[in-house]
Image (cartoon, rainbow, N blue to C red):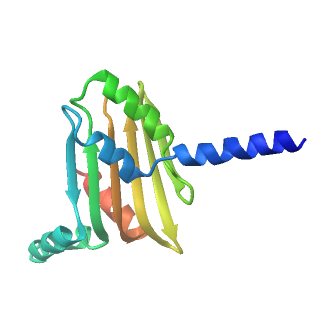
Amino acid sequence: MKRLFTAMLAVLLCAGCFAQSATDIMNKYKDKKGAESLNVGSMMMGIVKLIASHDDEARDMMKPFRSIHLVDLDDCADGVKCDFAVDTKKLRTKGYDELVRVNDNGDRIVVYTLQKGNRIKECLVVSTGKNCFLAQIKGNASMKDIDRWITENSKR
């Protein structure tokens, strides 16, 4: 019985070691042939917000966001996309809520949010299949901000 318990504990600890953060996955794939990477840090977001301050709609849309990181693998080889799909299944999502999951003709999109109180502090968007990407958006948004952003962008 003691050996069984020890073995189960070892398996659980190892599984946790293989989990990867979104940043780990982005760093692993950002330099792959055909990959596109975007990193808009807090300093650059401040500049973007300053430029957008003359446009009320753009300013309001950008206000809740602090940083955006994205890696897009659409132009990568199929082997890279398969490896990416395997790695994103090991994505560390403890503490995140799954907001939505979509499966459409082999493409899988999952949106996770990290909330503190009624504020969304981080959003992860994971897409695998033909269109592979991982986006990490950090900020301090309310559900009202997200709803407004989705409504305004779905009109276009």
Is 18 situated left or right of 24 in this image? right
Q: Considering depth in this image, is 54 or 22 the residue closer to the camera?
A: 22
Residue found 25% across the figure and 52% down from its top: 155
Out of 105 and 11, give the one closest to the viewer: 11
Q: Residue at x 35, y 64 (%)?
A: 138
Task: Kindly give the residue lying farthest to the front in the view shown.
Answer: 3
Where is the N terminus found, in terms of image quarters? Answer: top right
The percent position of residue 61, horizontal first and vertical second, equals 25, 67
Foreground residue, 36 or 113? 36
Q: Is residue 34 above or below residue 115?
A: above
Q: Is residue 96 above or below residue 133?
A: below
Residue 153 position, x and y percent, is: 26, 54
Q: Is residue 8 left or right of residue 16?
A: right
Residue at position x 39%, y 30% in the image: 83
Q: How many marks?
A: 0
| Residue 15 vertical placement versus 116 (above, below) | above
Q: In the shown orientation, is residue 76 left or right of residue 134?
A: left
Write down the quadrant of residue 152 in the picture.
bottom left
Q: x, y (%) of residue 58?
A: 17, 68
Residue 144 horizontal/vertical position (percent): 40, 69
Regarding residue 19, the answer to whether it shows in the image is yes
Residue at 40% in and 53% down: 124
